[in-house]
DNA sequence: CGTACGTTTGATCTTTCTCAATAATGGTGG
DNA sequence: CCACCATTATTGAGAAAGATCAAACGTACG
């Protein structure tokens, strides 16, 4: 099957964003065993406390990583968009310290963890590319600590909206200055460490200020520049590839 | 110089916590070029926005990672204790997305980033060990998102105290059920996303409850079990080595 | 023995949470 | 295609956690 139709093309694209992979590397990635599966919202891709046996790459749909407190409060610690390998974070850890769950319906490609490990062992460039992907994830976690720890509700929510927009854009998934936010206000609340009630009010505030427009889950960026300012958003932490280098 | 006196012994110990390194691997790590330097509190080991050129391993003393919001609020995103490589987080990233600064006086071993990269390229087992170290750091970031996003002041502060205790213990740096907290209440506040005033009151609350005892910066765990409960602390996310495997 | 920094305390103000009820929406079975 | 149900979104009123402002107090160190 030509690589264009291969579910792993997405993964390959992701890996090549920051590291140069030669023909053999690319071949090896494309040759990974994988099974494609359709999944419903709520499906677990990783379950806290379990030993990870494979790595799911999101082909379509959205997912989120989260942790729970002892009394059941949820905190979403990151969002995953198509192309994201959801499980590199436990590639070499024996027990998952968090869960990953589908936000929407979608498709995933499951790759045996052992194959990824073997690949990273055998091919330094691929190992490096995976490491970069992991490091970028870690950088996003750090920004989220800042977001949740030091910004007020308005900036916090605006920040998540900005991050999502920029990441979608980076994967060529955004259509213009708008997107469908793939989550409920309650889930958004869990991402920013607030209450769904307060998220609702703050969303309306952002709208009243003319920063966004909303129609159900659809978010339009009425004033992208000012929204970024309000969000205190600077995309540096996403470590976007400055330029896609050709093959 | 025998490895016991080598500043890199600490790094080696860290790397070997989760991955098996053979003789040659260990040799290679011990042979890394490095310069030891004494540093004062406040010294920057990494500066946000700069291109990292070397990786500092903490030999003695404590450091912290932090980020700033646009209006100057600081959020500490993790604490570093002796043995921690402070800079693996930017091993393959071109621009540092956060700063690392010394909390106390201490000593660091600076290793050229290029050498670490070369080492990870040449030695898969070392690469894997570094990846694990990075993954554990990432796991700690995730826990901090949860801590700051979903726990109240009392639990949050207790949680940081617990984490610090367990990590010190893991490096054989704690003397019994007490330690000297190497930071001001203001810095602790920046670590938990609160005000120093509120940290002060909460610390006194924890003391009044009989969970800790304090004398200046010295923290004693008067009731370790109950403190962990209050903190909602579970060390799983630290991914501590189940057992130190012999050479 | 001052001075600067860190800690402690009080009083008041804000943001965000809670609780509760009402209104939309979307999906589903008939 | 329509009525019904379960979610999700919205709104209001009151409570609480934590922030802010300001001042006093300690303590280490030059």
Image (cartoon, coloured by chain):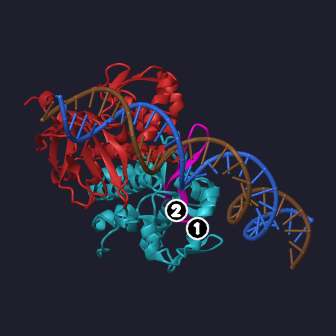
Chain colours: A cyan, B red, C blue, D brown
In magenta, the rendered stretch is A56-80
Look at 22% across and 38% down and name the residue there: B58
> Callout 1: helix, strand or loop?
helix
Q: Is residue D17 above or below residue B224?
A: below
Q: Residue at x 41, y 64 (%)?
A: A232
Residue for point 43% across, 47% down: A90
Residue B118, position in %: x, y?
Answer: 18, 52
Specify which label sits upstream in the sequence, 2 or 1: 2
In the foreground, A211 or B165: A211
Q: Is residue A227 above or below residue B82?
A: below
Left or right: B162 in relation to B149: left
Residue A2 at least partly seen: no
Chain ID, mark 1: A
- A225 or B109, which lies in front? A225
Magenta residue check for B169: no
Measured as percent of width and height from the top left, residue A119 is found at 35, 54
**Few, some or many residues within 10 Å of mark 1 (<14, 14–19, 20+):** some
Q: In the rendered structure, find residue A154 and report the number of the disc placed on it.
A: 2
Please provide percent x and percent y for residue A219: 57, 73
The C terminus of chain A lies in quadrant? bottom left
Query: What secondary structure is the magenta-colored segment mainly?
Result: strand
Residue pointed to by mark 1: A205
Q: Nearer the viewer, residue B75 or D1?
A: B75
């Amino acid at each position: 099957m030509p690589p264009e139709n291969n579910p792993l093309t997405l993964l390959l694209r992701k890996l090549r964003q920051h590291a140069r992979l030669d023909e053999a590397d690319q071949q090896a990635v494309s040759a990974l065993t994988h099974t494609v599966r359709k999944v419903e919202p709520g499906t677990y891709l990783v379950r806290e406390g379990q030993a990870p046996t494979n790595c799911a790459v999101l082909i379509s749909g959205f997912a989120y990583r989260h942790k729970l407190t002892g009394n059941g409060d949820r905190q979403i610690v990151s969002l995953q968009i198509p192309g994201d390998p959801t499980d590199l974070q436990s590639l070499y850890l024996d027990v998952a310290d968090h869960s990953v769950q589908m936000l929407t319906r979608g498709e995933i490609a499951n790759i045996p963890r052992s194959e990824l490990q073997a690949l990273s062992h055998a091919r330094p460039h691929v190992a490096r590319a995976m490491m970069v992907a992991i490091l970028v994830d870690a950088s996003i976690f750090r920004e989220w600590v800042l977001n949740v720890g030091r910004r007020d509700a308005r900036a916090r929510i605006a920040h998540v909206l900005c991050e999502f927009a920029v990441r979608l854009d980076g994967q060529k998934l955004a259509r213009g200055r708008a997107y469908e936010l793939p989550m409920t206000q309650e889930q958004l609340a869990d991402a920013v460490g607030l209450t769904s009630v307060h998220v609702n009010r703050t969303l309306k505030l952002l709208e009243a200020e003319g920063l966004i427009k909303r129609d159900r889950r659809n978010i339009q960026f009425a004033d992208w520049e000012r929204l970024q300012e309000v969000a205190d958003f600077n995309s540096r932490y996403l470590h976007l590839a400055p330029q896609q280098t050709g093959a």
